Amino acid sequence: MIALIDYGAGNLTSVRKAFAAIGAPVVTPAGPADLDKASALVVPGVGHFGATRSLEPEWREAIARRLDAGALLFGICLGLQWLFEGSTEAPGVGGLRRIGGVCDRLDDHGGTLKVPHVGWNALTVTRPSRLLDGVADGAYVYFTHSFAAPVTAETVATSSHGRAFAAAVESGRVMGVQFHPEKSGDTGLRILRNFVALAAGT
């Protein structure tokens, strides 16, 4: 079972449709206890990092239990940022802390560059990744964000808008993308298929 977590900060409809398009329906758990049978967890999200405050300790504990039991965790956009320690966008709100580092605002270079970063941009694949298997270096994907995660050892692809940032991360069973795979055409669907295949093998 793939659990799509609804904490009020994501376009669940488009994510759900993308998974359905590849033959992988998802369920939306009503509460943390409903995660107990999930082989994979998806945390989507758009908007302000403060929205992740809704992922209260009960949710965090349930997610941690599933990870410890062998489930996969996939963050999309704000969901990727939540995998880190936190964000300067909401200094009092902690992330899941599965990856070290703090997300920060993209640099508009004195107003010469538009922030938020919205539209298609290329990926630079930095190392082999199960999540990005079959995704070509230079493939274009769709972004919409003002804050981004730093490039760390867990980064498997970067992109750039004023500075380089982590476009995709993978650390064991924890993975995520800053872009929206559900809006990224064949490349996005390939990434979702990879995630589903990995979940099926857990």
Image (cartoon, rainbow, N blue to C red):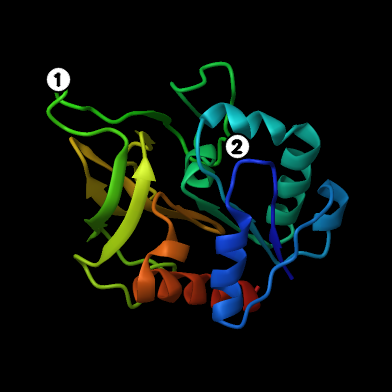
On the image, which quarter does residue 114 sit in?
top left
Q: In this view, does 179 lie above or below 147?
A: below
Q: Where is residue 134 in the image (x, y as percent from the top left)?
A: 33, 78
Q: Where is residue 87 in the image (x, y as percent from the top left)?
A: 46, 26
Is the C terminus in the top left, top right, bottom left or bottom right quadrant?
bottom right
Query: Residue beneath label 2, please?
Result: 96
Q: Residue at x 53, y 30 (%)?
A: 49
On the image, which quarter does residue 187 sit in?
bottom left
Q: Can residue 125 be seen here?
A: no
Is the N terminus in the top left, top right, bottom left or bottom right quadrant?
bottom right
How many other residues sit within 10 Å of disc 1, few (<14), some (14-19) or many (≥20)?
few
Q: Nearer the viewer, residue 187 or 171?
A: 187
Q: In this view, does 167 lie above or below 25?
A: above
Of pointers 1 and 2, the one earlier in the residue sequence? 2
Q: Is residue 70 above or below residue 96?
A: below
Q: What residue type is labelled 2?
A: Leu
Q: Residue at x 53, y 70 (%)?
A: 195
Mark 2 secondary-structure assignment: loop
Q: Residue at x 50, y 36 (%)?
A: 47
Q: Where is residue 89 in the image (x, y as percent from the top left)?
A: 45, 23
Side (left or right) of 8 relative to 138: right
Q: Can residue 15 be seen here?
A: yes
Callout count: 2
Query: Residue beneath label 1, please?
Result: 110
